[in-house]
Image: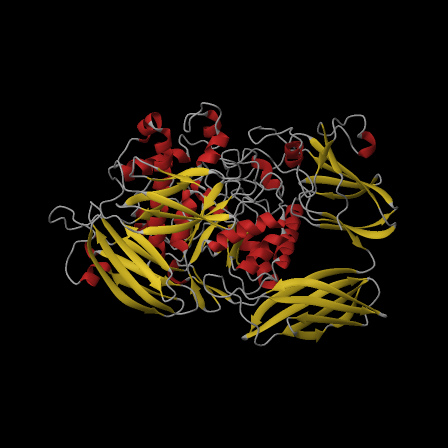
């Protein structure tokens, strides 16, 4: 039960009040607040702080208080997380001190029936001002280098890409637990032992000694051993669940789960304690020859997805319905992995439950990034040991957690600063995590750091990499192959342009993207660099479309944005198609970043409200579990790969069509297709036509004949997926009229939009304010029709919009 829903906050200068008794003389205005929550979230809700305000919440002491009326007597207060240097008083008596935002505290108390809880979150700046040894290297990711001495997130402190909103306060629940019948689960580990799904259980029981305790998993029940353990009672045992279904990522099977519960008998009373759902799976990481290939239940899995961002970066807590929508969006797109990076936070419990349910794997970093960790300090070491144990125990029942990692860019940062490899090791990931995981989360692969491996940790052809060859380093698209990427846990970061609605919400009256300070302030950049990620995107606009982006931006801002959206689609689809192809060295690619923390042309595949950007559409098309993808193999022609990651066999057909520049069908070929589950087939498109056509236009013995190559995969249920390849590239003339048409038919609360064109439509986009389409930024072949569902955004009443293509001067008006 939550302590209260009636919290308020106030600020005092650092050190001005030692305790609640001294608070009245120095506290300012008290502002209502939510718990879980942060100071920034409370001030945002009160209209006293905005996303562009650069308030330093680490400068002051922040006081939180709430009264509670209820039953008197013994209880336990549970604090799920206090950010960061915190003291807690109950009715004026000091209960605890905490110096880690990731620590969980349980404190026995005696309630009076009318109780006041006060939390002081002390100034982090003042705490870090004390003289301490400096790290052996620095990072530009955060300004405060002494953050290495406290367990606090980088989120809200990385001004180069997110709001300045350092989290301060009880960011996880503050709860009242019964004192007499407390259950503390210490081990709920679902694993597969010698081929048998097994659950190991251990818990402490506070209260009367039980006469019986029964653990139930699915339909299997097992009595537990009851043993004295100091002032408490220990409940322990193991349940074998033969025949239990295995959990798979949804791209490769069913994410099967079983419910677990504990029934405890004390005297004449039986109490049932739900333990949540759990799943059984094995995970192996093949690391031979510098690779990293994950297999789940013996099935190799190409991992694809994105790096997770909290859905509310300011509060660091969100309603479970919003979390569900975010994870469901990922699963529906064919992503099968999310990474929680070391710059972030351990997520709220509902996130892991949703990933389990929806079949989305989690690559989970410990929350360490970039800085030199002072593990030789005994107090810091003890704090880290407790943090790792708490995290790993909480992950034991979650089959979605398939990799645990020691943190983000620690070894890369050290290496780039010239620190020798032995001195720049990520000590948490190499000295602490392997032993802790072996005991508390056995069977889950452990990675020392992301990135790591190779001659230098940032090299891409061995181990885990952060691949920004296509992206920040502005390498040609072919670099995705020549770099020999093995597994990239970050890649393909661009300043992704959001919808026109979101663009308008960023800009002031008369402002233009690219020039407005409000726009530029939110474009991500590497701190200290003389460029930002809009410059990166513009590089690919110039390369792919043969234009000067600055000239287009000045003359036609709307087209400038569309070219940016399209360039990102081309870069992402080409790169992910390369990574996924048969024979590729790559076994996993996670795009950076899933979600923007605020309305922006940020790294996010979706904007801060979850509305997909063009980058999301490109990633989704490359990630579908059942699809066909085309690629240009140069002198070896054009190849198509059919993927069937699903466990069921695929029966259908594969059709190829060739179109000339006028949109006329030049030729077509079709072959029957039968593919086992979890298999792929690579096909030479040139060979399918039976004679040399130079489809890739690599030999260039004459003028280019084929303008568009299309591959359509149809299964036996009639479901079709089409991919297109442009041998001549994306630099195409803009035509007066493509014969673009759109028809709308209402379907319940949504609309079916059918789009067709007489000529090839290059990057078709559906732009309807207040609505979102199920697909967008796709190619439309001459004479083809596509029907796409258009759905209203929550609370919106969409009326009209347009459908346009990048190579058409005329848009098609849509009225709903």
Q: Is residue 308 left or right of residue 123?
A: left
Q: Is residue 77 left or right of residue 785?
A: right
> Camera-side residue: 89 or 508?
508
- Name the quarter where the C terminus is drawn: top left
**Extreme residue toward the top, this view:** 510
> Camera-side residue: 777 or 14?
777
Residue 392: quadrant of the picture: bottom right
**Extreme residue toward the front, this view:** 745
> Camera-side residue: 484 or 156?
156
Residue 593 against residue 401 in the figure, above or below: above
Q: Is residue 144 visible?
A: yes
The image position of residue 401, as x and y in percent, is 55, 58
Q: Is residue 467 visible?
A: no
The image position of residue 585, as x and y in percent, is 35, 57
Residue shown at 40% from the left, 69% from the top = 677
Residue 685: quadrant of the picture: bottom left
Q: Which colouring convention does the figure follow?
A: secondary structure
Q: Is residue 185 left or right of residue 409?
A: right
> Camera-side residue: 466 or 807?
807
- Total tally of numbered discs in the picture: 0
Residue 144: quadrant of the picture: top right
Residue 683 against residue 89 in the figure, above or below: below
The image position of residue 554, as x and y in percent, is 34, 25
The image position of residue 334, as x and y in percent, is 45, 56
């Amino acid at each position: 039960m939550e302590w209260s829903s009636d919290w308020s906050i106030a600020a005092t200068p650092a050190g001005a009040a030692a305790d609640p008794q001294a608070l009245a003389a120095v506290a300012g205005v008290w502002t209502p607040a939510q718990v879980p929550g942060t100071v920034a979230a409370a001030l945002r809700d009160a209209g006293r702080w905005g996303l562009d305000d650069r308030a330093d919440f680490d400068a002051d002491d922040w006081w939180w208080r709430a009264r509670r009326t209820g039953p008197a007597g013994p209880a336990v207060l549970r604090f799920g997380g206090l950010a960061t240097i915190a003291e807690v008083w109950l009715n004026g008596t000091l209960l605890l001190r905490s110096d880690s935002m990731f620590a969980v505290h349980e404190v026995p108390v005696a309630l009076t029936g009318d109780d006041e809880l006060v939390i002081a979150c002390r100034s982090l700046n003042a705490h870090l001002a004390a003289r301490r040894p400096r790290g052996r290297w620095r990072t530009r990711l955060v300004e405060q280098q002494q953050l290495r001495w406290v367990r606090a997130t980088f989120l809200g402190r990385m001004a180069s890409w997110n709001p300045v909103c350092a989290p301060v306060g009880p960011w996880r629940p503050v709860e009242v637990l019964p004192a007499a019948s407390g259950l503390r689960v210490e081990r709920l580990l679902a694993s597969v032992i010698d081929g048998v799904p097994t659950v190991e259980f251990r818990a402490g029981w506070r209260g009367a000694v039980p006469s019986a305790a029964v653990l139930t998993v699915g339909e299997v029940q097992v009595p537990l051993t009851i043993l004295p353990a100091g002032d408490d009672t220990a409940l322990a045992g193991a349940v074998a669940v033969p025949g239990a279904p295995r959990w798979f990522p949804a791209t490769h099977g069913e994410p099967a789960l079983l419910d677990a519960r504990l029934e405890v008998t004390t005297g004449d009373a039986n109490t049932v304690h739900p333990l949540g759902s759990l799943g059984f799976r094995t995970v192996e990481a093949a690391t031979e020859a510098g690779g990293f290939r994950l297999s789940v239940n013996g099935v190799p899995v190409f991992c694809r997805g994105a790096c997770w961002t909290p859905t509310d970066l300011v509060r660091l807590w969100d309603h479970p319905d919003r979390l569900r929508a975010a994870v469901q969006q990922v699963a529906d797109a064919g992503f099968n992995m999310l990474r929680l990076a070391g710059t972030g936070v351990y997520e709220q419990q509902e996130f892991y439950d949703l990933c389990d349910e929806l079949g989305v794997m989690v690559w989970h970093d410990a929350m360490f990034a970039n800085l030199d960790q002072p593990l030789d300090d005994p107090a810091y070491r003890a704090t880290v040991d407790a943090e790792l144990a708490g995290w790993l125990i909480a992950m034991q029942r979650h089959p979605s957690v398939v990799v645990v990692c020691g943190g983000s860019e620690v070894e890369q940062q050290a290496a780039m600063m010239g620190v020798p490899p032995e001195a720049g090791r990520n000590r948490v990931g190499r000295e602490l995590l392997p032993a802790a995981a072996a005991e508390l989360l056995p069977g889950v692969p452990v990675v020392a750091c992301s990135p790591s491996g190779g001659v230098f940790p940032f090299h891409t052809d061995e181990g885990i990499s952060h691949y920004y060859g296509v992206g920040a380093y502005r390498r040609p698209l072919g670099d995705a192959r020549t770099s020999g990427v093995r597994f990239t846990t970050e890649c393909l970061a661009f300043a992704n342009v959001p919808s026109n609605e979101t663009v308008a919400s960023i800009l002031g009256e008369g402002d233009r993207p690219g020039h407005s300070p409000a726009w530029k302030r939110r474009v991500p950049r590497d701190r200290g660099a003389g460029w930002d990620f809009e410059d990166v995107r513009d590089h690919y606009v110039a390369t792919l479309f043969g234009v000067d982006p600055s000239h287009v931006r000045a003359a036609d801002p709307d087209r400038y944005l569309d070219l940016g959206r399209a360039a990102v689609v081309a870069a992402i689809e080409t790169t992910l198609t390369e990574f996924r192809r048969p024979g590729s060295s790559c076994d996993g690619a996670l795009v950076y970043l899933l979600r923007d923390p605020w309305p922006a042309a940020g790294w996010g595949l979706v904007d801060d409200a979850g509305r997909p950007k063009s980058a999301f559409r490109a990633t989704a098309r490359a990630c579908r579990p059942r699809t066909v993808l085309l690629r240009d193999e140069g002198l070896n022609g054009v190849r198509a790969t059919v993927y069937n990651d699903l466990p069921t066999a695929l029966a259908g057909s594969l059709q190829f069509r060739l179109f000339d520049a006028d949109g006329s069908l030049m030729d077509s070929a079709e072959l029957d297709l039968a593919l086992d589950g979890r298999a792929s087939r690579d096909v030479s498109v040139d060979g399918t036509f039976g004679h040399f056509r130079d489809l890739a236009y690599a030999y260039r013995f004459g003028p280019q004949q084929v303008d568009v190559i299309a591959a359509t995969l149809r299964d036996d249920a009639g479901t079709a997926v089409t991919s297109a390849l442009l041998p001549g590239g994306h630099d195409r003339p803009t035509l007066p009229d493509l014969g673009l048409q759109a028809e709308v038919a209402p379907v319940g609360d949504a609309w079916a939009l059918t789009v067709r064109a007489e000529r090839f439509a290059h990057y078709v986009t559906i732009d309807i304010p207040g609505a979102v389409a199920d697909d967008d930024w796709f190619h439309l072949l001459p004479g083809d029709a596509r029907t796409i569902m258009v759905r209203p955004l929550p609370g919106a009443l969409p009326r009209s919009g347009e459908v346009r293509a990048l190579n058409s001067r005329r848009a098609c008006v849509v009225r709903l």
